[in-house]
Image (tube, grey):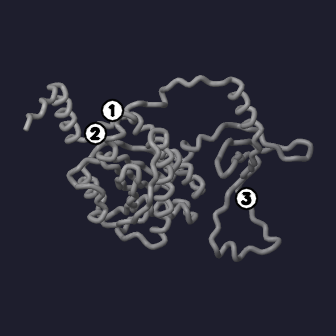
């Protein structure tokens, strides 16, 4: 039998360095598209939450890094639930998780809570209703992740199951590394966290694609097409409404209303009026009259995020 041809020294060194890097976990800084993907995902998730709950919600990426799968599962044991999805092109499984605070705060917002009640602090499991709502969030998050990855690699995610015990949520050997991105939610003065964990073995074949940030590519814009889009957007019709004052009723209050009953407003002619569209505040206005009609004079733009933070301070 002949001897195997010796491997080039450069090849041996390269393979050795790659093994060392893999043993220490993939460097997400070398894959800028991962940050772009998770930013796009959180944007789509925020839009979905905006359609579900009337209360303003702040949703953002807090961190993206590599950790051992065992450490990830241990950190969420006892206060989270996770959904396991099978990514068919990768032949791998990923985790999408929600901590209990995320679920409790979101359920309160979805069912009309205004944040006046203290946050639920007692340690308890997730109810059936909360589990069904969490499943809807999982599905929307999976769809957002799938759409965000499409710019780099087409993927199809198939839901498998939901677990509350992390011992049953292992998607790869516990000593192995995974890329984990964490997302923070703030709604009704409630904080919570969602996370996505993808095994390093699934990410490794995509390293070259993820290393190229396509958002930095310069595209040549067609000025006629840009002008056409601008004109069409400008002609879009929207409905706005002016809110003088908002009332908060209980069911007893509603049941006690009678025809002809007068409800006094605390607002005066000096009170500012909120102009909003699709439940989103736009401007503060001053109320007036002209030719027998009520008028509004736009006073200042409403910073929704700042208004939300101011409300938290008042609470």
Numbered circle sitting on residue 26? 2
Tell me how many marks there are. Answer: 3
Whether label 3 touches label 1, CB < 8 Å: no
Crowd around label 3: few <14 · some 14–19 · many ≥20 (10 Å): few
- Is 306 left, or right, of 250 in this rendering? left
- Residue 313 in sight here: no
The image position of residue 135, as x and y in percent, is: 47, 64
What's the residue at 19%, 33% (across, down)?
A: 15
In this rendering, the answer to whether 165 lies above or below 286 is below
Mark 3: secondary structure: loop
Task: Tell me which label, 3 or 1, sits earlier in the chain.
Answer: 1
Crowd around label 1: few <14 · some 14–19 · many ≥20 (10 Å): few
Query: CA–CA distance between discs 2 and 1?
Result: 8 Å
What's the residue at 56%, 65% (across, down)?
A: 111
Whether label 2 touches label 1, CB < 8 Å: yes
Q: Which residue is mark 1?
A: 30
The image position of residue 227, as x and y in percent, is: 72, 27
Task: Tell me which label, 2 or 3, sits earlier in the chain.
Answer: 2
The image position of residue 19, as x and y in percent, is: 19, 38
Q: Quadrant of the N terminus?
A: top left
What's the residue at 20%, 52% (across, down)?
A: 175
């Amino acid at each position: 039998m002949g001897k195997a041809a010796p491997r080039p020294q450069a090849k041996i060194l390269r393979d050795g360095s790659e093994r060392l890097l893999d043993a220490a976990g993939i460097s997400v800084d070398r894959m800028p598209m991962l940050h772009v993907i998770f930013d796009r995902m959180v944007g789509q998730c925020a839009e979905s939450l905006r359609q579900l709950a009337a209360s303003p919600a702040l949703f953002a990426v807090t961190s993206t890094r590599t950790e051992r799968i065992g450490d990830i599962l241990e950190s969420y044991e006892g206060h989270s639930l996770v959904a396991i999805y099978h990514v068919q092109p990768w032949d791998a499984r990923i985790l999408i998780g929600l901590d209990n605070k995320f679920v409790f705060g979101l359920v309160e917002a979805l069912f009309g809570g205004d944040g006046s009640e203290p946050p639920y602090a007692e340690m308890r499991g997730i109810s059936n209703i909360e589990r069904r709502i969490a499943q809807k969030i999982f599905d929307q998050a999976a769809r957002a992740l799938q759409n965000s990855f499409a710019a780099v690699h087409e993927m199809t995610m198939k839901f498998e199951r939901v677990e509350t015990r992390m011992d049953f949520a292992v998607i790869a050997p516990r000593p192995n590394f995974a890329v984990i991105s964490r997302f923070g939610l703030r709604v009704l003065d409630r904080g919570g966290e969602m996370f996505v964990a993808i095994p390093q073995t699934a990410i490794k074949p995509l390293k070259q694609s993820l290393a190229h940030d396509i958002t930095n590519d310069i595209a040549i814009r067609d000025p006629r097409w840009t002008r056409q889009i601008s004109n069409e957007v400008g002609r879009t019709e929207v409905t706005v409404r002016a809110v003088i004052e908002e009332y908060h009723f209980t069911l007893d209050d509603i049941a006690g209303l009678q025809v002809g009953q007068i409800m006094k407003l605390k607002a005066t002619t000096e009170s500012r009026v909120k102009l909003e569209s699709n439940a989103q505040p736009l401007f503060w206005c001053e109320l007036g009259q002209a030719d027998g009609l009520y008028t509004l004079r736009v006073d200042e733009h409403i910073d929704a995020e700042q208004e939300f933070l101011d409300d938290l301070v008042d609470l």
